[in-house]
Image (cartoon, helix red, strand yellow):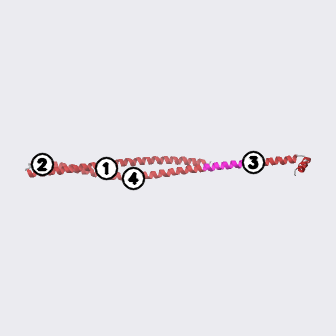
Amino acid sequence: MAQAPIRLELKAVRQLLLLRERRNDQARRALSETLRQIDLCQAQGQDARVSLAAHRKAWMELEQDIATQSHNVQMKGFEFQRNRARLDAMADQAARLQERINETDKTLATMQENAAEARHVFMKTEQRTHQAQDLLTGAKATLATERSMREEQELEDLNMARHNATLCRERSAQRKKLLSRLNTPADERQKRMSASP
């Protein structure tokens, strides 16, 4: 009767361990996915920074060319407007690239917060999984101890039964011997008594 709760407990602990292992696996996958997204976001941010640096260099070179042309030759109004429009387009493009970098940085910061939270959840689920494994180990040890104690008790009971059976046989033999002495006629008893030293 004492074994049923242990088996039930062992089954419940196994189910708990399975559940915690699944949650730990989910947390591990979520952390891995978050870290992968962070890597992608960092790569996009780096690409945007490289693009912005290249764009700024091209912009400065265009300004330099325009300045050189304006010193060497007198510019006509439409050339001046065309150069001004090109510079404005480059400025707008630089602003868009900078905005993309800023958005990427914000996204990256959010992702890093999410990664920290995912890492925390993963560590917590891993700790709980280890606790469940410890519970399972403890339940198995308790079951093994109880089984061992039960086997020892059975051996002790068996030895006691054998000892009692031996005592019963000895007592029975003594009774038979005593009864056989009592049932023998008095003359035979006397003969036996005188014959024995």
For the residues bearing labels 4 and 1, Cβ distance under 8 angstroms? no
Residue of label 4: 117
Left or right of residue 187: residue 167 = left
Name the residue type under label 2: Gln
The tag on residue 54 is none
Pick whichever, 116 or 39, lies toward us. 39
**Residue range corresponding to the magenta coloring:** 146-163
Between marks 1 and 3 in the image, the one whose residue lies nearer the viewer: 3
Q: Dot 4: what SS?
A: helix
Pick whichever, 163 or 83, lies toward us. 163
Q: Say whether disc 3 or disc 4 marks the residue closer to the N-terminus.
A: 4
Please rate how many residues cluster around mark 2, counting C-alpha atoms within 10 Å: few if below 14, some from 14 to 19, many from 20. Answer: few
User: What is the CA distance from the residue labelled 3 to the residue labelled 4?
Assistant: 72 Å
Between marks 2 and 1 in the image, the one whose residue lies nearer the viewer: 1
Residue of label 2: 81
Residue of label 3: 166
Name the residue type under label 1: Gln
User: What is the CA distance from the residue labelled 4 to the residue labelled 2?
Assistant: 54 Å
Between marks 4 and 1 in the image, the one whose residue lies nearer the viewer: 1
Q: Where is residue 183 in the image (x, y as percent from the top left)?
A: 87, 46
Magenta-colored segment: predominant secondary structure: helix
User: What is the CA distance from the residue labelled 4 to the residue labelled 1?
Assistant: 19 Å
Pick whichever, 110 or 179, lies toward us. 179
Q: Where is residue 185 in the image (x, y as percent from the top left)?
A: 90, 46
Please rate how many residues cluster around mark 1, counting C-alpha atoms within 10 Å: few if below 14, some from 14 to 19, many from 20. Answer: some
Q: Dot 3: what SS?
A: helix
User: What is the CA distance from the residue labelled 3 to the residue labelled 2?
Assistant: 124 Å
